Image: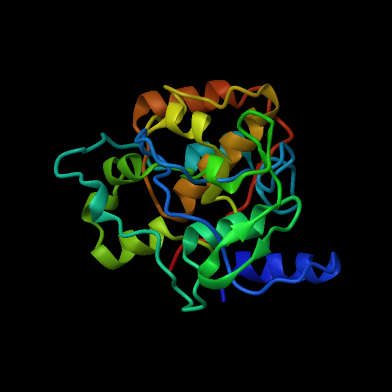
């Protein structure tokens, strides 16, 4: 069972929510295609707040290897998603929706979801319909390919695309912001909500470090520039196996 799922079940028990299966419909997260998915993360989402033992954000950014990007050969289908890794009937999209719900949804057969509420931290939007949410790969699939995933095995790319063991690798956000982001890095796109800036930079940096992905010089410079107001933000990550 994923760490995300364990966290959700604990929260559900504390709030006396009765959960039975999982949720919603397939979603194309970091691709500006017209399909619904995602959810949200509060503006104080994990990753943005200082944490003892972590790296200062600027220091963490400098730990990301710098290299030229390589887009040749990229296909979205090279990253298999959304899968049901733990065979509980709930694919990755639904697991994220359940983990990030502010108000727990009711669950029916075959991971259908009804009710519930979410907060999209990219734009501070309150959402009560899971179909209006996308699950965003914090570092988009195409960006991951450019930054090193082109050399990975199909199995590692699948693990990346369905990473439920790091809370901020996948986030539920409004479809509008997710599709505006598409496959852009922080040099090209940042969340519209000012409150999201430091959280987003921490989440992006932690994901790149977790998966040993590189950044090009333009991206690194933008990250360091954007991080200047985030002096109190720290980054913690666990390298992916």
Q: Is residue 176 left or right of residue 67?
A: right
x and y, in percent, of residue 75 in the image: 21, 46
User: Residue placed at 52% from the left, 25% from the top?
Assistant: 190
x and y, in percent, of residue 56 in the image: 65, 40
Q: Quadrant of the C terminus?
A: bottom left
Q: Quadrant of residue 30?
A: top left
Q: Nearer the viewer, residue 213 or 65?
A: 213
Q: Nearer the viewer, residue 193 or 56?
A: 193
Q: Is residue 68 left or right of residue 140?
A: left
x and y, in percent, of residue 168 in the image: 57, 50
Q: Is residue 11 left or right of residue 240?
A: right
Count of numbered circles on the image: 0
x and y, in percent, of residue 29 in the image: 43, 43
The answer to whether residue 102 is visible is yes
The answer to whether residue 166 is visible is no
Residue 190 sits above or below residue 24 on the image: above
């Amino acid at each position: 069972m994923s760490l995300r799922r364990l966290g959700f079940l604990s929260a559900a028990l504390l709030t006396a929510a009765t959960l039975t299966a999982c949720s919603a419909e397939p979603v194309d997260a970091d691709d500006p295609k017209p399909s619904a998915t995602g959810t949200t993360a509060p503006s104080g989402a994990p990753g943005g707040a200082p944490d003892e033992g972590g790296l200062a954000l600027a220091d963490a950014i400098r730990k990301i290897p710098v290299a030229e990007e390589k887009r040749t050969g990229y296909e979205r289908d090279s990253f298999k998603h959304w899968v049901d890794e733990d065979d509980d009937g709930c694919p990755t999209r639904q697991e994220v929706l359940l983990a990030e719900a502010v108000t727990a949804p009711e669950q029916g057969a075959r991971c259908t979801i009804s009710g519930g509420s979410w907060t999209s931290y990219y734009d501070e939007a309150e959402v009560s319909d899971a179909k209006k949410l996308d699950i965003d790969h914090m570092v988009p699939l195409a960006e991951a390919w450019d930054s090193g995933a082109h050399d990975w095995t199909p199995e590692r790319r699948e693990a990346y695309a369905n990473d439920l063991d790091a809370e901020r690798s996948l986030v539920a956000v409004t479809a509008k912001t997710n599709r505006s982001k598409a496959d852009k890095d922080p040099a090209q796109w940042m969340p519209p909500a000012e409150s999201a800036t430091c959280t987003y930079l921490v989440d992006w940096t932690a994901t790149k470090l977790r998966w040993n992905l590189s950044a090009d010089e333009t991206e690194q410079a933008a990250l360091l520039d954007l991080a200047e107001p985030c002096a109190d933000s720290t980054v913690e990550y666990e390298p992916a196996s």
